[in-house]
Amino acid sequence: MTILDIDFEKQPGPKYRAIAAALSEAIANGDLSAGERLPTQRELAWQLGVTVGTVSRAYAEIERRGLLSGEIGRGTYVRSGPPTQDLPMRAPAPPAAIDLTLNFPAPGEERRAIAEALTQMAEDPDIGALLDYQPDTGLAGHRAAGAAWIGRRGWPVDPERVIVTAGAQHGIVAALAALTRPGDRILTERLTYQGIKPASAMLGLRLEGLPMDAQGLLPDAFERAIGDSGARLIYCMPTVHNPTTITMPEDRKRDIAAVAIRHDVTIIEDDIYGILLGSPGPVPLATYAPDNTIYVTSLSKAVAPGLRIGFAVPPQELVERIGSAVRASCWMAAPLMADVAARWIQNGTADRILENHKIVSERRRALALRYLEGRSLDAPAGSLHVWLHLPEPWRAAEFVAVAQNRGVSVAPAETFAVGRGNVPHSVRICLGTPREEATLEAGLITIAELLQNADASLSMIV
C-alpha cells in the first residue's frame, strides 16, 4: 500500500476519523483492492506520524463499516465482496473505539477449525437429521460430550444429568424459570455478573446482594440472609468471579456448600471461567453439594462465544423441570451448533483452541501487568479481565467518562452492583475483545496515562 497523504490540519475532527475516511475512499476507488493486506498499525502510525492508538481506532472504525477483516497472526485485509449490510451486534459508543467492556476470548484457531468442521459435517450422510426437532435436554451424544467437557474440571458427571443449553446465560435463565415464581428473592454476591440482573427482572425476581471478602462470598452473611429473607436460591460464581477475579479457596467452598445443605437452599453455580485455570484446576463448588447445586458452564469463554452452546447439570430430580424450561424458552439448543461443539470436544479440537486461548490470554495479561505496574489490581493467571482499583482522587464513574472521551471504554463497578450499598471505585478491563494486541496495548497506555495524570484528566470533566 502506498503511503497515505493526509493533511491533518485541514481535516476536521479527530485524526483517526481522517485516516478512516482516507482508507475508505481508497477502497471505494479501487486503490486498495479486495484481499490486499494493510500495513500493521505500528507501520502506518510511523508513516503518518501519529500514535498507534490513533491507527487502532481508525482500523476499528473501518472494520465496523464492514470494509476490513483481521485475524491475529495474519494481519488486516480489505474485505472481499461487498461490505456487510447487517446491523452490528452492538452499537459502538462514540467516540470510544477501543472497547474493553466485553469479556470475550481473543480470536484464535477456532476460525479455521469451524471451516474444517462444517466441511466434515457436509460429508456426513446423516447431517440432515440435525434439522429435525430433538429432545429438549439434547441428543445423547451431545450430552455425553458435555459430561466429558465438565469432567475436565475434575468432576465426573452422569450424561443423563447433563442438559444442553444455548449458552450459560440460557442455562441460568432456564434454572431460574424452573425453580422460582415472580416475587421470589434470589441471593447473589454484592458484585456479580451483570447478566443475572436482566434475567431476574424479566422473571419478576428480586435480587439481594451479599457481602464478600478477599476469598469470595461470606458464609455467615449467606446464612443470615437465608434466615432474614427466606430465600431458597442463590446464584454465585466461585471460580474467577466476574468482575473481581476472586476464586474461592477449597475451605470457603466447603463452608458455602455446608450452609446450602443445612438450609436446603439451591445453588446456581456459574463456572464459565473455571476451565481457563487448567485441567482440572480448582474443583467446582458443586462437588461439595451435588444434590443442592445446578452447575452451569459453556464453551463461550473457552472456545468460541458464537457457538452458543452450554451445559447445565442439575440434581437428577430437577432434570425434567429444567428441560421443560429449555423447551418453553427455545425448545432446544441448536442441534447443528451442539454437534460442532460435541465433535470438537471428542476429537480434541476444543482442547487445542482452549490452549491457544490460554497462551494469548496470558500474553495479554502480561501487557496489562506491564502498563499498570505499581497499580492496585487483581489479574490472576487464566482470567480474561483485570479488576483495577482506582487511586485517589478518581471515582469510577468519572474515570469511565474521561476514558470514554479518550477513546477507551471500560466497565465501572456500579455495572455489577446488586442493591444500593457502597461499591468500590474499581473498573473491569477486558483483555480479549480487541482483535489486535496493538489495539489492546493502545488502550492500556491510555488508561495508564489517565492514572498517572489524574488531576489534569479530572479537570477536563465539565
Image: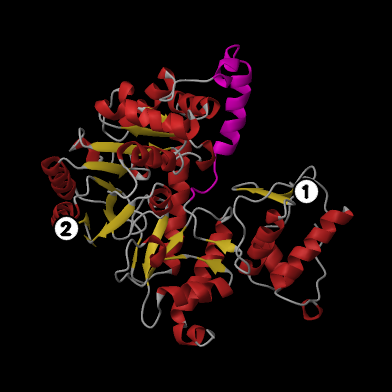
Q: Which residues fall within the magenta stretch?
A: 104-132
Q: Check if residue 386 falls in the magenta segment.
A: no
Furthest-top residue in view? 125
Between 223 and 3, the residue placed more toward the observer is: 223
Tell me if residue 293 comes above or below residue 162 in the rendering: below
Position of residue 59 measured from the top left corner of the image (x, y, whole percent):
68, 59
As helix, strand or loop, the secondary structure at mark 2 comes to helix
**Which of the two labelled residues, at mark 1 and mark 2, occupies the earlier sequence position?**
1
Task: Say what amino acid the circle numbered 1 marks.
Answer: Glu
Position of residue 323 measured from the top left corner of the image (x, y, whole percent):
38, 28
Asked if the residue at tag 2 contacts the one at tag 1, i.e. Cβ–Cβ closer than 8 Å, the answer is no
Q: Mark 1 vs mark 2: give the one in front.
A: 2
Main secondary-structure element of the magenta-colored stretch: helix
Left or right placement of residue 40 versus residue 199 in this view? right
Q: Name the residue beneath numbered marker 1.
A: 36
As helix, strand or loop, the secondary structure at mark 1 comes to loop
Furthest-left residue in view? 262
Task: Say what amino acid the circle numbered 2 marks.
Answer: Ala
Determine which quarter of the picture holds residue 414.
bottom left
Determine which quarter of the picture holds residue 25.
bottom right
